[in-house]
Amino acid sequence: MDQFTLNLLFVGASFALYIGIAVWARAGSTSEFYAAGRGVHPVTNGMATAADWMSAASFISMAGLIAFVGYDNSTYLMGWTGGYVLLALLLAPYLRKFGKYTVSEFIGDRFYSSTARLVAVICLVVASTTYVIGQMTGVGVAFGRFLEVDNTTGLLIGAVIVFAYAVFGGMKGVTYTQVAQYVVLILAYTIPAIFISLQLTGNPIPGLGLFGDHVASGEPLLARLDQMVTELGFAEYTTHHGDTFNMVLFTLSLMIGTAGLPHVIMRFFTVPRVSDARWSAGWALVFIALLYTTAPAVGAMARLNITEQFWPEGVAGEAVSVETIETSPAYDWMETWRQTGLLGWEDRNGDGRIQYYNDASPDMQAVAAERGWQGNELTNFNQDILVLANPEIANLPGWVIGLVAAGGLAAALSTAAGLLLAISSAVSHDLIKGSLNPGISEKGELLSARIAMAVAIAVATYLGLNPPGFAAQTVALAFGLAAASIFPALMMGIFSKKINNHGAVAGMLAGLVVTLVYIFLHKGWFFIPETNSFTDADPLLGTIKSTSFGAVGAVVNFAVAYAVAGMTREPPQEIQELVESVRVPRGAAIAQAGH
């Protein structure tokens, strides 16, 4: 059976499962659409949360970013994992005790203001839409490769699939679909990693193999990798090279952005009791850890495999020949990925070989002049393809490649569905029912939610065709927006009785606007190419990149909120008592009934 047929079987079987579950668990009421009827078991919810959380950025993109940068991009691991702990400890149980359906509803009620609720909707939609762009980017990469079509066609196919099961299932359908997707994605991520770790180190546990010895050379694997990449003019893999201040800000932005992500917070509204919200968070962390402890090994081993494929005799020898790439089965993956437009190479000096090296390095420029090279001939290697291409690069069996295809799509689609649900509930429940048309029927509210989701899919698909960065980088921008707007409002809403409606609204707007403007200045206005005034290589403020600015935006939010609240009337007594009742453990075993 050829690889294309195998891919279709794995992807088709997994999609049939997802859509079948969505139909079986179709939401029939607003309670089921927004919160799955509040009847989800903590372990089930933990697994669904993990799938919701581990997006295309985690599955497809993160290991690629680590592979091509090394230690400096471990910030993705630290920020996202640390942020989840913040969410579990500081927000989830209290929000579940409050007993509402959405983040915007909590902000509207806590700050006793329809304006605050409306501003929260705007913040949520902006952050979530930016996040969905990253997911759709991943969907395009995965579909493009495994259906052997171009990236644009893959993106459009993925959009139709997301529409099919997210629009009809609501939170109830999405929850049980995400449980299946978690099982698929974790198997798809760990099985190839185990194979590759055994090949390179003899150790079946990738996290341990990373610190073991490289079988072929007898050296420690990381030392072997450091030696090869530095000989090619790249930065040493295991050392810190970037700006430390920006690195700290970036990690902080990811952490507090994680804790402010509405689509993850919404998952904690689906369990029966507050104690279940705590248990859900704990289980989710266990399920997430299975992938996150494997990712550094996947990145390092893939980088070593790629480098050795281009320099089979070592850097001192000759580079791989064009003939070998065209005729050897070990290099079939290159032609397959070239068809997607995400991989490219060119024999610039006509010597019949493809030299892969850092042609910006002065040392390598001298070597290139001596050996007759005319620049790096690996002209395009999109970092988002690395995890999906990894089994092919390592010459693993065809069924493993098919499984990875299904896993990559599961990761992208599970998070896309959760984000679209957050957007649709914000529009239908908080904007339409909460402000524009309070008397809307339940049937009308469900219809408006599904229409809002369809519009969000269309916008995200359009923007996904020209994303502002790799999947994980686009997602980092969304985390920055959530960090600057939603997280401070939730923290002040739970832990401060002093912040009133004026302070909350002013803080959210200030944090969102300053962060959005900073991002647009670096990434282009509304992410339109070539409309930017600065780049992340040469940022506006010192060394602060656009992906790191969320932490600064959060400080602006807090500062403005406290300043405005200090100049205006303090919150009513009943609101201060509400804050006390949400925060203090009295009655914590029983959440409010909600609506």
Image (cartoon, helix red, strand yellow):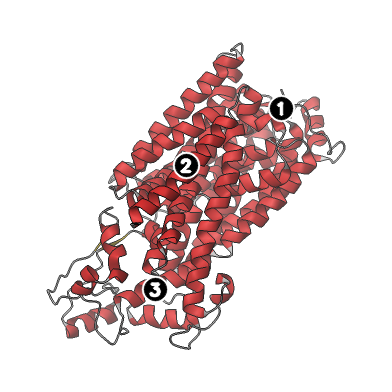
Q: Give the CA separation, mark 1 to mark 2.
A: 54 Å
Q: Amino acid at mark 1?
A: Arg
Per the model, the C-alpha gap separating discs 1 and 3 is 63 Å
Whole-percent x and y of residue 451? 47, 23
Residue found at x 51% / y 20%: 448
Picture quadrant of residue 113 = top right
Asked whether residue 573 appears in the rendered view, the answer is: yes
The tag earlier along the polypeptide, 1 or 2, is 2
Q: Is residue 335 left or right of residue 289?
A: left
Residue 569: mark in rendering? 1
Residue closer to the observer: 477 or 323: 323
Q: Nearer the viewer, mark 1 or mark 2?
A: 2
**Amino acid type at mark 3:** Asn
| Residue in front for this viewpoint, 572 or 48 | 48
> Which badge, 2 or 3, comes first in the chain's sequence?
2
- Tell me if mark 2 has few (under 14), some (14-19) or many (20+) residues whose alpha carbon lies within 10 angstroms of its own: some
Q: Nearer the viewer, residue 62 or 79?
A: 62
Q: Residue under label 2, please give it.
A: 15
Mark 3 surroundings within 10 Å by alpha-carbon count, few (fewer than 14), some (14 through 19), many (20 or more): some
Residue 326 rendering spot, x and y as whole percentages: 21, 68
When asked about the image quadrant of residue 486, the answer is top right
Q: Which residue is mark 3?
A: 305
Name the image quarter holding the N terminus: bottom left
